[in-house]
Image (cartoon, rainbow, N blue to C red):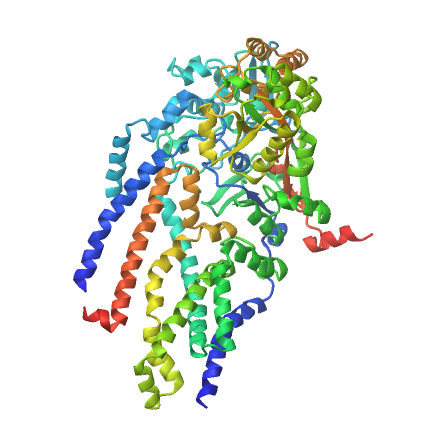
Amino acid sequence: MLRLIVRRILETIPVLVLVATITFFMMKAVPGGPLDTEKNIPQEIKVQIEAFYGLDQPLWKQYLSYMGNLLRGDLGPSFKHANRSVNELIAAALPVSLELGGLALCVALLVGIPLGIAAAVRQNTWIDYLASTTAMAGICLPTFVMGPLLVLVFALHFEHFNASGWDFPRDRVLPALTLGLVYAGYIARLTRGGMLEVLNQDFIRTARAKGASETRVVFRHALRGGLLPVVSFLGPGIAGILTGSFVIETIFNIPGLGRHFVTSVFNRDATLTIGTALFYAALVVALNLAADIAQAMLNPKQRAN
Amino acid sequence: MRYKTNRRSVRELAFTALAGLVLVAGCGKPPTLVGEGDRLQILHRGSSSDPQELDPHIVQGVPEHNILQALLENLVTEDPTDLHPVPGQAESWDISPDGTTYTFHLRAGIRWSNGDPVTAHDFVRSYRRALTPSLGCEYAYMYFVMKGAEDYYKGKTQDFSSVGAEALDERTLRITLNGPVPYFLSLLNHYSWWPVHLPTIARYGDPYQRNNRWTRPGHFVGNGPFVLERWEVGHVIVVKKNPLYWNAASVKLNEVHFHPIESADTEERSFRSGQLHVTEQVPQSKISVYRRDKPQLLRIDPYLGAYFYRINTTRPQFRDKRVRQALAMAIDRKTIVENITRGGQLPAYYFTPPDTVGYTSRSAIRYDPEGARQLLAQAGYPGGKGFPPFDILYNTSESHKSIAEAIQQMWKRELGIDVRLLNQEWKVYLDTEKRKDYDVSRAGWIGDYADPSTFLETFLADSGNNRTGWANAEYDRLLKEASRLGDRETRYELFQKAEAIFLDEMPVIPIYHYTRVYLLRPEVRGWNATILDHHPYPYVWLAPRPEASLATASAAAQRP
């Protein structure tokens, strides 16, 4: 187990170097630069600014100095946010994204798993159909429809929430619901599938035969195995919740990482793009590893290996 | 028995989420930001994007201006109704008879927000900083009307005493210009000319380099009506009343909160839910809704800007000016502003917006499809036959796309010309346009200061903003001559001649003149329509009527 973990951590290093390198050269390859603006900057001024950011150096030199700084953990200055470093911007936005993601994850699990269990236990009854339809609706309704819809009802009609912002605790509710319900849909479907598979197995029949209550069968015997697909989904799923929040952050005007990730590309803010891309890459790798470990611990078959 | 337990637990689970919502919904309605703001004189203003910086010598955008205007004040400031220059940090000034020397007399006892006195030396030091090449001030050319500024900026001299800015004593500042610049005082209202506190900047890094941290909250020292309190990227910027401001007694607002909201839809929803007093924009689809249902909240102000199409005159098919004229004459601008933009924009039959400080072009384009067909035929393309198909380039935006589609249709219908649409992402589009790798390209120009020259000088042969490949010696000569004159009548006559040449040559096709379309709550007072969309904060205040909520306001409007 330990060897597995060490090996996986070592494997991430080339992955991150590759991500940084590819992003770096892709940002250099797209037309237009951070200093291109609608009003022309006189050539003499442009030269000064380029020299300040080292953009006058040959590409390989820029790359080496970027990678050198990266080794020291310095992601460089941002172009668009002219007096902030990328480290600062990520540090300021990360807690917001984590909070939003964490709350959304709670919504996803608290809605998705019960829904999935209900559907599996009452397979092919109206409960199953209702739960499955709800889950499907959650998956199919895009966040950019769901978000404004929730705002329309709960913020503009009932006036219980603000339409946007991140100032008060109640500002967390609608974005977390919007983001969480999509994943709740996936989780409900996965739980239902996993549970159905387990419920048809022999050991469940044995448990029932020896007189265990249905509640005990479902929650004690079946759930452990039934949740396996959910656990393996959670690795990339959590990464998705944390990275895929650009739309939510825009709809609700939340100062999180997702917006930096996307708008920095439009601003050609290369350092910020690479910084966020690297951060997300590291996150995906780490969460996948965590999911693998969790799965190994839950699944006796894998533990043996 | 077993089943019952189970069914109950299933039901419980199924309704957990719903119960949570009901619980939250059960709590009373929370107070709105706007309601609190009305009580405490806190203005909540929507701002389309985060400021790039709050250093007046580095920034270059409109959101930055709106914030800096609260934090810094120049020698003169703007009258809240028509923006004419009024005394700011200077209480008076003398202009030499030839109009080239301005002597400013600073107010007594004015101070920076850290308590230091504001002196004439502060202004000279600020100009020196803005003009130091290593800082890379992108608006440094705004200084080029001042004697010696351009040479110093371009490194031709290291001696700042050769520049026409001199502190005669603590309270007297003399600025010498290259010639009479009748709009000089208006130019001073552009932030590139605003003073900064050099000792503060030096404390947080090299004052002549970028990436200085002096503009952070807690570091920032200004001399304006407000001081910087909070700055959280993508979230909020808060400025608080500055008790040391010379005119603090007449500033009624206690705070201004700037909310950077990039999405117009989100901003509009925030306005409706009582989080903003004033928005930066209105989604295009919502304009007619507001006009119908809540006209008292919708503001449409004239704005000093032109929306136009550049023509790449280096392309063979556009070398003939008759072709360019034909294209311009075949566009039905009225249809575009009435059916597409719908924000009260003015159809543009000339380039400089009408009544730019008393200047309106006498020459104008006509909407004349028949005349356009004749011109095209004379140029060798009767009925559009043989005219090579070309692209209209525009940056990604629903509105640019709709306008381009309409024009594509008009050119097909009236002239028989085939046009394709080419959509590029903003920075790619800028790059394409600068490399002159386009045929016809959508563009906009907003005046930097209130004078016709800010529009016409854009198309001087050596202007970096020309980008059409068009050059005309007589046009350049007229504008250069106008820049040396002090008399408004004579200057405007020269502008008339220059604009006549411009419209005859038609290197760009004017389409409409901008308006500023935004939402404003009724309790905001002193918020006047001004052509630069500037709203000096010392004159703004909030006057909430009892229960002046959106609902009651609209109900009142519906009552007979």
Check the image and name the residue furthest to the right.
Answer: B560
Q: In x, y percent, where is residue B282?
A: 61, 43
Count of marks placed on residues: 0
Who's the residue at 43% across and 12% down the image? B162
Q: Is residue B262 above or below residue A42?
A: below
Q: Quadrant of residue B513?
A: top right
Left-right relation of B297 to B246: right
Q: Position of residue B553 (x, y in %)?
A: 72, 52
The x and y percentages for residue B486 are 62, 12
The foreground one among A39 and B194 is A39
The front one of B274 and B466 is B466
The residue at the far left in this view is: A3
Say left or right for B478 vs A93.
right
Q: Nearer the viewer, residue B130 or B435?
A: B435
- Is B326 situated left or right of B426 in this image? right
Is residue B183 something that shows in the picture? no
Looking at the image, can residue A146 be seen? yes
Q: Quadrant of residue B151?
A: top left
Residue A180 or A191: which is nearer the viewer?
Answer: A191
Does residue A154 appear left or right of residue B158 in this picture? right
Percent of width and height locating residue A155: 59, 58
- Residue located farthest toward the front when viewing the structure as drawn: B385
Q: Residue at x 66, y 21 (%)?
A: B373
Q: Is residue A59 above or below residue A44?
A: below
